[in-house]
Amino acid sequence: MRALVYHGPMSKAWEEVPQPALEADTDAIVRVDAVTICGTDLHILKGDVPAVTDGRILGHEAVGTVEEVGPGVKNVRPGAKVLVSCITACGACRFCREGRYGQCLGGGGWILGHKIDGTQAEYVRVPFADTSTYPAPPGVSDEELLMLADILPTGYEVGVLNGKVSPGDVVAVVGAGPIGLSAIMGSRLFSPAHIVAIDKADTRLEAAKQFGADVTVNNDREDPTSVVASLTEGLGADVAIEAVGVPATFELAATLIRPGGRVANIGVHGEPATLHLEDLWIRDVTITTGLVDTFSTPTLLKLTSARQVDAQRFVTHHFALDEFMDAYDVFARAGETGALKVVVTRS
Ligand SMILES: NC(=O)c1ccc[n+]([C@@H]2O[C@H](COP(=O)([O-])OP(=O)(O)OC[C@H]3O[C@@H](n4cnc5c(N)ncnc54)[C@H](O)[C@@H]3O)[C@@H](O)[C@H]2O)c1
Ligand SMILES: [Zn+2]
Ligand SMILES: [Zn+2]
């Protein structure tokens, strides 16, 4: 089969590799029907995630058809259409029992396209298939479903729920890439008073309006703290969601927050950020961090089926599997191409 293989920083190829086979009783082999690329894959290609080594097939998001299951798989059957979640769950360890699947101690967590071969391939081996896949609900297309593999649960859990977005809140979202947009979409479910999207790219700010932000700030041209202050009688945002992953945006989120407010960090950080405790200690501020767990996937599936969440909105570009290198190119130049999520499908 063919797959997108990482060959060290800045190097990747769409190339012939051996087809995956069942390794454990609880594995499934899934034929990939639709797959996408994450901002985290770009971090990997920059060399920011050293656990990913030469020869690794990338990708942690897919929708596919089950080909084969091990004898220990109880619910997932060959022929079924499934969502392959970015987080694999053993289902039995202490953290899985708490729904904290991202921290799985039994061999799960974020492993696809990280510690084991991933989904950017014609076929993928999915460990713990019963607890790491979800059956496709009727009436939801492959590409809508694909948005639930990572970005929708990440924005919702690590941004909206960790930040405890509540009715009437002023929510500031720093970074309007797919993750920030997903946090904006998820925040809307809780009827905030205002959602302020902050980004340096005007294309992303335009997208933020489509996703439910009513105020946009290009922080290259305008000071987001004064915009947020003008909406909050000078107090600051009730919730600030960081969705970029660089020190400057974490520090900005911490300055935007009101006393008693909540900073929810989503970004993957590769270097230290300064925590200004000398300003924050007296302000009763809560700061949360998190790797997505995907415990919210069943909720998001219901919201997508019921058309309360428009997953389709994220999809900007389509490619065939053999065009995977082009898909990466368009996704990596999102500022110019306007790409949010690129969908690569089996033709
Ligand atoms: N915590 C998790 O479980 C989890 C899961 C998935 C992704 N992530 C991380 O979330 C982050 C966002 O992901 P994405 O796919 O949306 O990334 P992205 O690169 O597509 O979007 C980031 C956005 O931030 C903007 N930006 C960059 N620097 C800025 C600055 N100084 N001020 C304002 N805006 C700025 C960019 O213009 C871009 O629109 C990444 O760090 C990604 O790795 C975390
Ligand atoms: Zn991802
Ligand atoms: Zn576990």
Image (tube, rainbow, N blue to C red):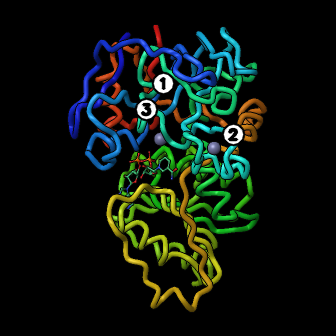
State the image coordinates of residue 115 (x, y, percent, origin top left).
Answer: 42, 37
Q: Earlier in the sequence, mark 1 or mark 3?
A: 1
- Tell me if residue 214 comes above or below residue 334 in the rendering: below
Mark 2 CB within 8 Å of ligand 3:
yes
Looking at the picture, which amino acid does disc 1 mark? Val
Real-space Cα separation, disc 1 to disc 3, in angstroms? 17 Å
State the image coordinates of residue 106 (x, y, percent, origin top left).
Answer: 59, 42
* Residue at the spot of label 1: 35
- Tell me if residue 5 comes above or below residue 10 in the rendering: above
For numbered disc 1, what is the local secondary structure? Answer: strand
Relative to 25, 250 lies left or right: left
- Number of marks drawn: 3
* Residue at the spot of label 3: 116
Q: Earlier in the sequence, mark 3 or mark 2?
A: 2
* Residue at the spot of label 2: 91
Depth check: give the residue in front, 22 or 264: 22
Looking at the picture, which amino acid does disc 2 mark? Gly
